[in-house]
Amino acid sequence: MGKKENDKKYRDSQKGKENRKKYEKENRDKIKKQHLKPSRIHKWKSRGVIFHDWDLLYEIYLQTTHCDECKCQLTYDRYMRNTTKCLDHDHSIIDDNNVRNILCHCCNNKRR
């Protein structure tokens, strides 16, 4: 392979990296949502949540804006706060749907 061909490959890969970075910057929210759903569902499964339709559960979770127990407005924060949205489930049920409610962190802790 000649020097010209090698230089062209390098330029193309650099251009590809620049285009990818530009796309990621312009579509940050879209990309985040695409990765957030599988991550959240995986986390629920690893914590013992059982549900018949994960897509439906995720949509219900997203649409819920107030705690089912105390009716406070739910938030989604980087750090756990009293109003952070939590998916409550019954740990004693291991062979069927065990989701109970979507609660704030405070109400979820009270149920323990």
Image (cartoon, rainbow, N blue to C red):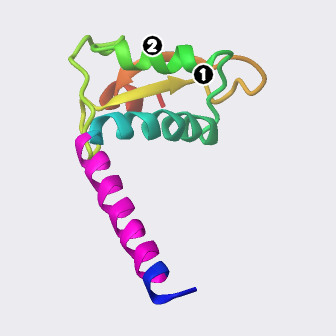
Q: Is residue 32 magenta?
A: no
Task: Give the residue type that dot 2 points to.
Answer: Ile
Q: Secondary structure at mark 2?
A: helix
The part of the image, by quadrant, that contains residue 90 is: top right
Q: Is residue 25 left or right of residue 48?
A: left
> In the rendered image, which residue does mark 2 sit on?
60
Residue 56 position (above or below residue 6): above
Q: Is residue 8 magenta?
A: yes
Q: Main secondary structure of the magenta part?
A: helix
Q: Nearer the viewer, residue 92 or 47?
A: 47
- Say the numbered circle drawn on residue 98: none
Residue segment shown in magenta: 6-26
Residue occupying the point 24% across, 33% down = 82
| Residue 4 locus on image (x, y percent) | 43, 83
The part of the image, by quadrant, that contains residue 43 is: top right
Q: Is residue 107 left or right of residue 35?
A: left
Task: Give the residue type that dot 1 points to.
Answer: Trp
Residue occupying the point 48% across, 32% down = 37
| Residue 14 locus on image (x, y percent) | 35, 69
Q: Is residue 50 left or right of residue 60?
A: right
Q: Nearer the viewer, residue 13 or 1?
A: 1
Picture quarter with the N terminus: bottom right
Residue occupying the point 29% across, 39% down = 27
Numbered disc total: 2
Residue 26 position (above or below residue 84): below
Whether pointer 1 and pointer 2 mark residues with C-beta atoms closer than 8 Å, the reply is no
| Residue 97 locus on image (x, y percent) | 68, 17
Q: Is residue 88 left or right of residue 107?
A: right
- Say the numbered circle drawn on residue 54: 1
Label 2, residues with CA under 10 Å away: few <14, some 14-19, many ≥20 = few
Q: CA distance from mark 1 to mark 2?
A: 10 Å
